[in-house]
Image: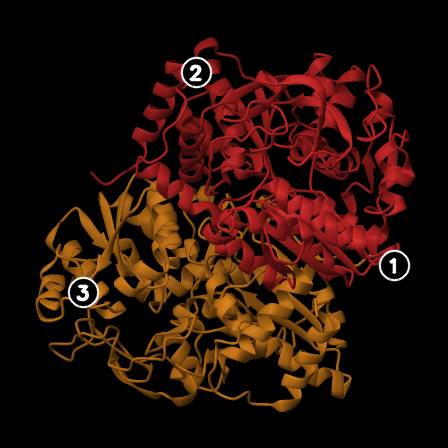
Chain colours: A orange, B red
Amino acid sequence: MSHVQQHKFQLDESEMPTRWYNVLPDLPTPPPPVLHPGTGQPVGPDDLAPLFPMDLILQEVSTERYVDIPEEVLDVYRLWRPSPLYRAHRLEKALGTPARIYYKYEGVSPAGSHKPNTAVPQAFYNARAGIRKLTTETGAGQWGTALAFACAQYGLACEVWQVRASYDQKPYRRMMIETFGGTVHPSPSELTEAGRRILAAHPDSTGSLGIAISEAVEVAAQDPTSNYALGSVLNHVLMHQTIIGEEALLQLAQAGETPDLLVGCTGGGSNFGGLMFPFLRERWAGRMSPTVRAVEPAACPSLTQGTYAYDFGDTAGMTPLMKMHTLGHDFVPDPIHAGGLRYHGMSPLISHLYETREIEAVAKPQTECFSAGVLFARTEGIVPAPEPTHALAAAIEEAVRCKDTGEEKVILTALCGHGHLDLAAYDAYLSGNVVDHAWEDADIQAAVAEALSRLPTLA
Amino acid sequence: MSHVQQHKFQLDESEMPTRWYNVLPDLPTPPPPVLHPGTGQPVGPDDLAPLFPMDLILQEVSTERYVDIPEEVLDVYRLWRPSPLYRAHRLEKALGTPARIYYKYEGVSPAGSHKPNTAVPQAFYNARAGIRKLTTETGAGQWGTALAFACAQYGLACEVWQVRASYDQKPYRRMMIETFGGTVHPSPSELTEAGRRILAAHPDSTGSLGIAISEAVEVAAQDPTSNYALGSVLNHVLMHQTIIGEEALLQLAQAGETPDLLVGCTGGGSNFGGLMFPFLRERWAGRMSPTVRAVEPAACPSLTQGTYAYDFGDTAGMTPLMKMHTLGHDFVPDPIHAGGLRYHGMSPLISHLYETREIEAVAKPQTECFSAGVLFARTEGIVPAPEPTHALAAAIEEAVRCKDTGEEKVILTALCGHGHLDLAAYDAYLSGNVVDHAWEDADIQAAVAEALSRLPTLA
């Protein structure tokens, strides 16, 4: 039946990619080195050995184009991978656009986001190195959930320091981490010197990601059987995420499409890099020519407003210095609902690609993003996490432009997670309690409002 | 590679069943009629016309073996269907069982459960009949979420009366209904005579499903452009759910398996019937011979402890009389976390099959179910809703028995929804705050505890 519109483009498990793509050797120019905060010299493997297993340290600096995914990791990936690619027929119809919108959905994972793609190999390499426990920080809770699940697969304990404000306001994330077998401490905690020092000075401290990192690093550094795990920013993390883009390439080919525009949200950059790097490789090889666009929150615009400079990865200034787009390591963004995008810096690889004009970037106010999220939920049936509503807003913006120009653009967007544990943010938006920067473009605002108004509401 | 274990058994959209299976004409003996509460005579289509569209009334009494699914419904089903069937390799390994455990997962739907399978056609038939608004009740909120999503697909308004206790304690469900465009009222409300009467007598009433039904029915009955929708119990609801079983038959065949045991949880019976009816058809045709087992909560054991008698579907005694297994329409079950299983009665079709020995039933205490849910989450990566943990507990029980007998039984269980919005229940369980009936079998308890102890926890 010719009118049947295929919605899902699935791959069999046997078609799942078995290697990660390392963008480093394909970069048009080499990225600047990471520097030791004390000496100002490039860091070597030994500098990182107290916190990371050698397999991950070598991946961080590898110049091999492909890295085989261990069989033990593929076994766990198969719980949810290959993840689906969808064509957003019903969203297109609501917008009345000739554009064809596709979304790669990572919300089917155990944590409900892309984070397990790197949490699983990180836990595996640590377990193989004889490590017994991983420590980490978590803000909104996505990363802590992913690492707790991953640790359960390889017999590792998992200890998570969750920013106190988030620990108190988002108890469901803590509960999910505990259900997967992890242990959660509100940060600052009495368990570390870093935490005790903060609490002595500020007994009512609601914490920060920087403090939580300090606590997790302190515990890992003091115990030779414990290591620390980071959920974004670093090269090896982005490499693990490239399975998203490798799958999406196969799925778009299955749909018979070549993308004109790729859009993804950027916080630390791992979801964005994971989808985009394999497509950039194809573009550099001359097989396609998509525009690649990063979407960041107007409240934390590291690419569009930050400077490209050496800066610390954490607030306290304990990490190596990375050359990246940054708002300054002491920048405190507004408390927008997309907690995963509230990071002062940007992955050095993404920053380098932006600086060399390989990718574009835009910043979106959160009301525009929530509006896109609500329209998407009502048409496609998935409530997106606040983070990927930024990418959806940019996809919708382009689709509305296509309505004017008549272009049948193929748009692919990264839907990196569901919003089941973020419903309070939607509640705030629907109650009119989310206010922020003005929309960039009144025409887009009018088009989305019109699409929403054609959907039913109870007067 | 022979050691690669396939986890997912997926169908393409082109393989999605295009008809529902109506078990009625295949029943070994005909079920007793539904009676009018006033006259005591069998109800006719006209009796139901104020609340339901004629398409659904005719489906309720249809004796056709198959009913074609309208193309407009298939289009929406394709947003998430066919749903996946999984083999629980990692759960099997944790249990050390020779049994092969499969689960059919409905948590991929927009509402996160099986409920949209019937919400979507109900909304469609109502919209085609010119209805502008659907009203309904919701307890835990799954059904209200499904109907709100379904109404958004066909331009209907959706008005949900949510039991006040649930409205206050589970705000995420209300928020999800509103995100899909529905309107939620706590029940009892000032909007109906039924609600006002209760509030006058009991200003602090926390409501009940019976009161919420009365309010939703009152509003629908007074407005010729509004109808009422029910999420379980009725014949047409169970028929819509048979797409679950039809898909599972194809997927088990793809896996090369014939089931020995089918287990599903039962509240009103729609998820259970949806999976089981197509398998019963195959059994009656002599193509397989699985045992079919219903699992109900020990706190609300309508099949194992109730009587088979004519009773009302609601607490207030306003509905037609149905012959069913019932604990009495004024029975108030303990406030267990599996809110969807707290129903005094059981679908007449399921009751009839139980009475005629076509299916078995067991009752499980909720601590056993949560224990199964936690083991499942840590091994398979999905946090199940409290309702299907009952089916998982029964599947695990059988798998542990197989460990003793060495039987390689093929067990298929219905995983009817995820527990993302039920994490507070897991928190209560993990904190030791869920106590109830004793486990039936100490050996099972020991085996599950041992499997859990082999998984990592932080001492």
- Quarter of the image where one finds residue B376: top left
Marks 1/2 same chain: yes
- Residue flagged by tag 3: what amino acid is it? Ser
The mark lying in front, picked from 3 and 1, is 1
Q: Residues within 10 Å of mark 1 (few under 14, many from 20)?
A: few
Q: Identify the residue position indicated by label 1 in the image.
A: B130
Q: As drawn, which residue projects farthest toward the front?
A: B201
**Residue beneath the point at 41% across and 22% down:** B437
Residue B186 higher or lower than B381, as above or below: below
Q: Identify the residue position indicated by label 2 in the image.
A: B440
- Quarter of the image where one finds residue B181: bottom right
- Quick check: A375 left or right of A117? right
- Quick check: B266 left or right of B397? right
Q: Which element carries disc 3, helix, strand or loop?
A: helix
Q: Which mark is residue A214?
A: 3
Q: Label 2 lies in what chain? A: B
Q: Label 3 lies in what chain? A: A
Q: Which element carries disc 1, helix, strand or loop?
A: loop
Q: Position of residue A225 (x, y in %)?
A: 17, 46
Q: Residues within 10 Å of mark 2 (few under 14, many from 20)?
A: few
Q: Quadrant of the N terminus of chain A?
A: bottom right
Q: Is residue B266 visible?
A: yes
Circles 3 and 1, Cβ within 8 Å, touching? The answer is no
Cα distance between the residues tagged 3 and 2? 48 Å
**Residue beneath the point at 77% across and 64% down:** B155
